[in-house]
Image (cartoon, rainbow, N blue to C red):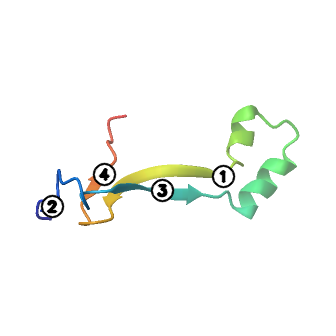
Amino acid sequence: MTECSRIGKWFRGCKFEARYDIYTPTKELKDIISRQWNTSPNDKDKLLEEMIYVQDVCEVCGKVVARCEND
């Protein structure tokens, strides 16, 4: 992708917006965990819906800033 011609401008410069994937546990996973006699806190955490950060995208020029894999 080419460098944004609007970078550093006060008016209509780059405006980044975060993009997320949404993790939703499946019905099968919920059934398996609910049938267990002793459910651990880690298993209960698997039943929560999560938003996982993916990247930032500029709404003006389309430039993408991907997540850092070292974190």
Residue 41: percent from the left, percent from the top? Answer: 74, 33
Front position among marks 1 and 2: 2
Q: CA distance from mark 4 to mark 3?
A: 11 Å
Residue, disc 3: 20
Q: Please tell me which of labels 4 and 1 falls first in the chain.
A: 1
Question: In terms of image quadrants, where is residue 70?
Answer: top left
Check the image and name the residue furthest to the front: 11
- Identity, as a three-letter code, of the amino acid under mark 3: Tyr
Q: Residue at x 36, y 54 (%)?
A: 55
Q: CA distance from mark 2 to mark 4?
A: 16 Å
Residue, disc 1: 49
Front position among marks 2 and 4: 2
Residue 4 is labelled as 2
> Helix, strand, or loop for circle 1?
loop
Q: Residue at x 33, y 59 (%)?
A: 57
Front position among marks 2 and 3: 2
Q: Nearer the viewer, residue 6 or 43?
A: 6
Q: 56 left or right of 29?
A: left
Q: Residue at x 69, y 48 (%)?
A: 48
Q: Residue at x 33, y 42 (%)?
A: 69
> Helix, strand, or loop for circle 3?
strand
> Helix, strand, or loop for circle 2?
loop
Residue 61 is labelled as none
Q: Please tell me which of labels 2 and 4 falls first in the chain.
A: 2
Residue, disc 4: 66
Q: Please tell me which of labels 1 and 3 falls first in the chain.
A: 3
Residue 8: percent from the left, percent from the top? Answer: 17, 50
Question: In terms of image quadrants, where is residue 16?
Answer: bottom left
Q: Nearer the viewer, residue 17 or 29?
A: 17
Residue 20: percent from the left, percent from the top? Answer: 48, 56
Q: Please tell me which of labels 2 and 3 falls first in the chain.
A: 2
